[in-house]
Image (cartoon, helix red, strand yellow):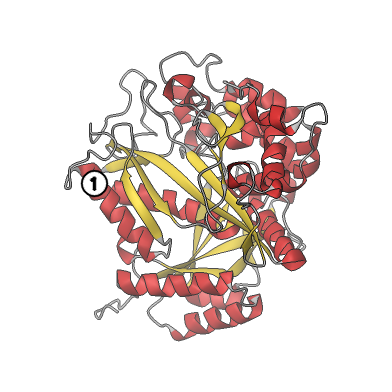
C-alpha cells in the first residue's frame, strides 16, 4: 500500500499472483455466485485505497471495451449499470440502444498498478437487454451458459489453452499510422530463441511475463517466435470462459506494455507478407468428473472415440467455421502454404499443415489442437462454436471417418469465399441466431473497404479497417 497524498492501492506482483490465483480457484471449484458477490462487495466496501472498478466486455467482433466506474458509485448502482449499445459496432440499433452491464463477480481481478494505474480492480460484465434478459450478442454470456450447462448436466469441464503469437513493432500506434509503402519496422531481427537477453524484444517479453504471472495466468514458457520481432507467451489450460478472458487480458497487457516502451504490440494475423504470420493455436479437451474423456491409450494417436467424433464434426463443418476462425481480410494471408499454413481440412499427429493436430498426450494432457485460428478471432465466439460443433455439429454421411480425417481439402484462401460459406451455412444460422446476420454484415463491410485481391503487398486498407485497429474516427466517415 502506498502512503502519501493519494494513498491508492498498489499491490506487489507476488501478492497479486496469490490473490488472482485464489480468485481463479474459487471459480474452478464452483463457489456460488452469491457467495462471490458478497465477498467482493464487502472487499470493495472495506478497501479504502480502491478508487475505481474497471468493468470490461467484448463486442461481437472481439474488440475489448472497458468502462471505469467510481467505486462508491458502483457499490450503490451495480444493479443498474447502463450503456449505449448503438455506439458499439455490431450491437443494438439506435431504437433499442439501452443495454445493461451485470457484473460477473467471479471474474474479479487485482491489477498491476504500473500497467493499469493504482487504485483499480477489474471485473468482466454480462450484457443484458433493458428488460434484464440476456443480450444475444454477448458471446461471453453465451459461452458461460454453455459451460454451466456442461457442468450441471455431467460435471463436464470444457478446457482450453491457446498459443497466442504477436509482433512487436517500433513506434507507438504503428497500426493506426500504417503505410503500405513503408510497412512495419521490426524491433529485433533475431529469430526463434535467438533474441539477446536485453534486446528490446526480450525486455518486452520479460515485462509481459511478469504481468501475466501477476494476473494468475499460470505461465509455462515464453520466447521469441520464428519471425523477426515475433513473440509467444504460453500459459496453462483452464475453463473456456477463464481462457477467453485471459486472451483479452493478454492482448490488452501486451499493447499497454509495448506502448509504455514506445512500441506497438500487434496481433494482426499477417502484418508482413514474406515471413511467418501470427496464429492462435487452440488446444481443447473435455473432462467429465475429473477424467479427460479425450484420452484412450488404445485409441488411434491415443485419442478416444469421443475425441475422434469431436474432431470429425469440426472437420465436417470447417469451411462454414472458417470466417469465425479468420475474421479479417488480413487473416487469409496467413493461410499461405509457403509458411507452414494450417490450411488443409484434415487431422494429423505430425503434419503441421493440417487444420487439426493430435499432439502426443497422456491421460492428463490428451487434447486436440485447432491450428487454423488467427489471433484476431473473438475468443468467446470461437470457443462456443468449436465446443458446440465438436459435441453436436452435423456429420456428413457421405464420408467415413478415415476419409474425412485424411483427404486433402483446403480452407478458403480469401475472405470472400469464407463469407460465402458462412452465409450459406444453415447450421451456423441455427446455432448463432440473429448473430449470424450481424456478424456477416460486419465482415462484408470490412471486406468492401479493402482491395478485393490480396496480392503480395500488405494493403493499407486491410490494416486501417481491421476490427482490432481502433480507428473509430475513420470508420465514422462511411
Q: Quadrant of the C terminus?
A: top right
Residue at image mark 1: 202
Q: State the residue in front, 11 or 149.
A: 149
- The picture quadrant where one finds residue 415 is top right
Q: State the residue in front, 335 or 82.
A: 335
- Which structural element holds mark 1? helix
Residue at image x 47%, y 13%? 455
217 with respect to 405 (left or right): left
Marks counted in the figure total 1
Residue at image x 42%, y 30%? 277
Q: Residue 249, how many percent across, how many down? A: 45, 55
Crowding near the residue tagged with mark 1, few <14, some 14–19, many ≥20 C-alpha atoms within 10 Å: many
- The picture quadrant where one finds residue 119 is bottom left
Q: Quadrant of the N terminus?
A: bottom left
Residue 327 visible in rendering: no
Q: Residue 165, how many percent across, how many down? A: 41, 41
Q: Residue 129, how many percent across, how many down? A: 73, 58
288 with respect to 450 (left or right): right
Residue at image x 48%, y 36%? 473
Q: State the residue in front, 231 or 338.
A: 338
Looking at the image, the residue that sits furthest to the right is 397
- The picture quadrant where one finds residue 348 is top right
Q: Residue 63, how many percent across, how many down? A: 53, 45
355 with respect to 182 (left or right): right
408 with respect to 164 (left or right): right
Q: Is residue 44 above or below residue 180?
A: below
Residue 174 visible in rendering: yes
Residue at image x 71%, y 57%? 146
Q: Is residue 85 above or below residue 192?
A: below
Amino acid at each position: 500500500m502506498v502512503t502519501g497524498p493519494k494513498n491508492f492501492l498498489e499491490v506487489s506482483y507476488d501478492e497479486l499472483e496469490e490473490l488472482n490465483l485464489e480468485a481463479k480457484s474459487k471459480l474452478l471449484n464452483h463457489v456460488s455466485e452469491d457467495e462471490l458477490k458478497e465477498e467482493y462487495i464487502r472487499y470493495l466496501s472495506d478497501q479504502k485505497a480502491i478508487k475505481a472498478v474497471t468493468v470490461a466486455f467484448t463486442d461481437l467482433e472481439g474488440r475489448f471495451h472497458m468502462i471505469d466506474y467510481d467505486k462508491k458509485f458502483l457499490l450503490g448502482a451495480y444493479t443498474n449499470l447502463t450503456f449505449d449499445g448503438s455506439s458499439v459496432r455490431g450491437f443494438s440499433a439506435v431504437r433499442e440502444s439501452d443495454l445493461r452491464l451485470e457484473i460477473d463477480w467471479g471474474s474479479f481481478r487485482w491489477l498491476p498498478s504500473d500497467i493499469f494505474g493504482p487504485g483499480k480492480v477489474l471485473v468482466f460484465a454480462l450484457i443484458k437487454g433493458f428488460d434484464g434478459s440476456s443480450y444475444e450478442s454477448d458471446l461471453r454470456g453465451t459461452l458461460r451458459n454453455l459451460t454451466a450447462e456442461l457442468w450441471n448436466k455431467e460435471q463436464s469441464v470444457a478446457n482450453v489453452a491457446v498459443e497466442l503469437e504477436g509482433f512487436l513493432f517500433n513506434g507507438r500506434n504503428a497500426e493506426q499510422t500504417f503505410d503500405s509503402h513503408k510497412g512495419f519496422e521490426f524491433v529485433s531481427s533475431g529469430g526463434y530463441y535467438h533474441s539477446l537477453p536485453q534486446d528490446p524484444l526480450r525486455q518486452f517479453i520479460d515485462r509481459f511475463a511478469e504481468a501475466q504471472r501477476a494476473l494468475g495466468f499460470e505461465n509455462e514458457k515464453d520466447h521469441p517466435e520464428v519471425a523477426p520481432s515475433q513473440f509467444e507467451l504460453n500459459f496453462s489450460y483452464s475453463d473456456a470462459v477463464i481462457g477467453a478472458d485471459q486472451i483479452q487480458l493478454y492482448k490488452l497487457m501486451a499493447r499497454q506494455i509495448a506502448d509504455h516502451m514506445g512500441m506497438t504490440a500487434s496481433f494482426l494475423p499477417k502484418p508482413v507478407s514474406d515471413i511467418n504470420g501470427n496464429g492462435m493455436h487452440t488446444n481443447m479437451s473435455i473432462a467429465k468428473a475429473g477424467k479427460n474423456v479425450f484420452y484412450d491409450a488404445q485409441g488411434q494417436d491415443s485419442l478416444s472415440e469421443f475425441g475422434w467424433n469431436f474432431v470429425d464434426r469440426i472437420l465436417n463443418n470447417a469451411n462454414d467455421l472458417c470466417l469465425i476462425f479468420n475474421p479479417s481480410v488480413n487473416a487469409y494471408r496467413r493461410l499461405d502454404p509457403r509458411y507452414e499454413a494450417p490450411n488443409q481440412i484434415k487431422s494429423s499427429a505430425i503434419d503441421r499443415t493440417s487444420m487439426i493436430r493430435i499432439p502426443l498426450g497422456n491421460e492428463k494432457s490428451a487434447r486436440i489442437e485447432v491450428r487454423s485460428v488467427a489471433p484476431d478471432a473473438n475468443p468467446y465466439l470461437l470457443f462456443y462454436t468449436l465446443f458446440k460443433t465438436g459435441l453436436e455439429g452435423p456429420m456428413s454421411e457421405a464420408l467415413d471417418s478415415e476419409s474425412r480425417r485424411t483427404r486433402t481439402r483446403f480452407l478458403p484462401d480469401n475472405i470472400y469465399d469464407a463469407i460465402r460459406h458462412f452465409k450459406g451455412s444453415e447450421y451456423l444460422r441455427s446455432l448463432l441466431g440473429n448473430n449470424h446476420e450481424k456478424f456477416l454484415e460486419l465482415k462484408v463491410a470490412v471486406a468492401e473497404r479493402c482491395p478485393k485481391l490480396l496480392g503480395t503487398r500488405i494493403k493499407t486498407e486491410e490494416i486501417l479497417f481491421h476490427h482490432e485497429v481502433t480507428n473509430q474516427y475513420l470508420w465514422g466517415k462511411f
